Image: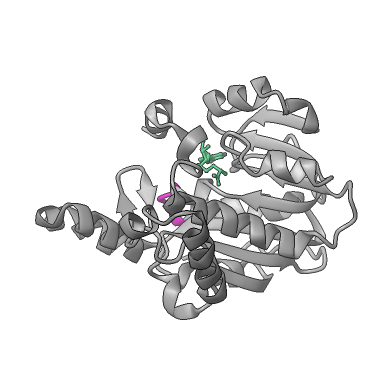
Amino acid sequence: MLVQYYTTYDEKRRLKKDNAHLVEYRTTLHYLQKYIMNLSRGSTLLDSCAGCGVYAFPLAEMGFEVTAVDLMQKHVDIIKTSNKSSLLKNVYQGNVLDMSRFAENSFDVVLCFGALYHLQISTEREKCIQECLRVLKGGGLIFFAYINRNAIFINHFKHSPVDIKELDELLLTGRNGVFYGMDFEEPDMLAGKLKIDKIANIAIDGLSYPLADQINILDEEQFETYMKYHLATCEQKALLGHSMHGLWIGRKTNGKSLPNETYP
Ligand SMILES: C[S@@+](CC[C@H](N)C(=O)[O-])C[C@H]1O[C@@H](n2cnc3c(N)ncnc32)[C@H](O)[C@@H]1O
């Protein structure tokens, strides 16, 4: 089902197709730069759900040694045939749930911007973060993105209010087609279980889904003003459950072995 979804979906254009989507892209890059710019150039970075390379390429251009992985062969092919592909150290098709091709403690930074949008079983969400932590060096930085349950509800209701009954399952379980929406407290619980030091939890696109029509009519200068408002507010807890995407940033606690307990 997931393969079918991405086979027909144009992921390559997603983040740059309009202002409302650019908010997610610009804000994610802003926080990546904020937390990794002080690492030495040549630090190793794994983009574990790299899509079509939307972050892998700019990070490689900044001087990081980037390895890109994605589940979808279609996306891997897009990365490999890009005229920037030689900037990347390696590109693989693979699943974040099994990154056995990488030894433990291999990377200074691990990004996981995609798998948690779709993992509908709690033990798999935990396994996803555990794998990212396994390949991350002690003291290294982990960035994972997730989708908020409330935001999926609001977005569906906005576009199709008469189908509200169809949202029952989402509200009860977080499942919505191929997507999984987290309760806004789940990332902290998940990270707490796995003993990652929290740095930040960001409402990465804030109100850009409910306000998309308004944001999309802004000219360049007006959009820059909107971005200033957004960047000034996206760390506010009040916005977390409203933002379609959340970005959780943390640090692996000093290379100690990870606990074996499972998420209830
Ligand atoms: C919405 S796209 C995001 C792409 C890009 N990282 C971004 O943030 O724009 C989600 C990506 O995650 C990939 N993905 C989903 N589940 C995955 C998994 N278990 N392992 C690796 N990649 C996965 C999908 O193939 C897709 O390319």
Please say whether residue 120 is one of the residues in the magenta stretch.
yes
Q: Nearer the viewer, residue 71 or 205?
A: 205
Give whichever of 122, 6 is nearer the camera. 6
Decide whether residue 190 is among the magenta residues: no
Q: Left of 60 or right of it: where is 204?
A: left
Q: Which residues are magenta?
A: 118-122
Q: Percent x, y for residue 153? A: 27, 60
Q: Quadrant of residue 34?
A: bottom right
Residue at left offset 50%, top offset 54%: 220
Instruction: Give the image location of residue 226, x and y in percent.
Output: 48, 66
- Any part of residue 187 in sight: no
| Res 143 seen here | yes
Could you tell me which residue is drawn at 74 percent across and 46 percent down?
A: 59
Indicate the position of residue 104 as horizontal and vertical percent values: 79, 48
Query: Of 230 and 243, which appears nearest the observer?
Result: 230
Residue at screen point 66% across, 24% down: 82
The mark tally for this picture is: 0
Which quadrant of the view contains residue 255?
A: bottom right
Question: At 65% from the left edge and 60% from the top edge, which residue is drawn?
Answer: 30
Examine the residues drawn in magenta and state their main secondary structure.
loop
- Horizontal side, residue 64 vs residue 117: left or right: right
Q: Residue furthest left?
A: 162
In terms of image quadrants, where is residue 194? bottom right
- 42 left or right of 152? right
Choose between 234 and 191: the one closer to the eye. 234
Q: Is residue 242 above or below residue 29?
A: below
- Image quadrant containing the N terminus: top left
Q: Position of residue 60 (x, y in %)?
A: 77, 41
Residue 226 vs 11, above or below: the answer is below
Which color scheme does this rendered protein use? Answer: one colour
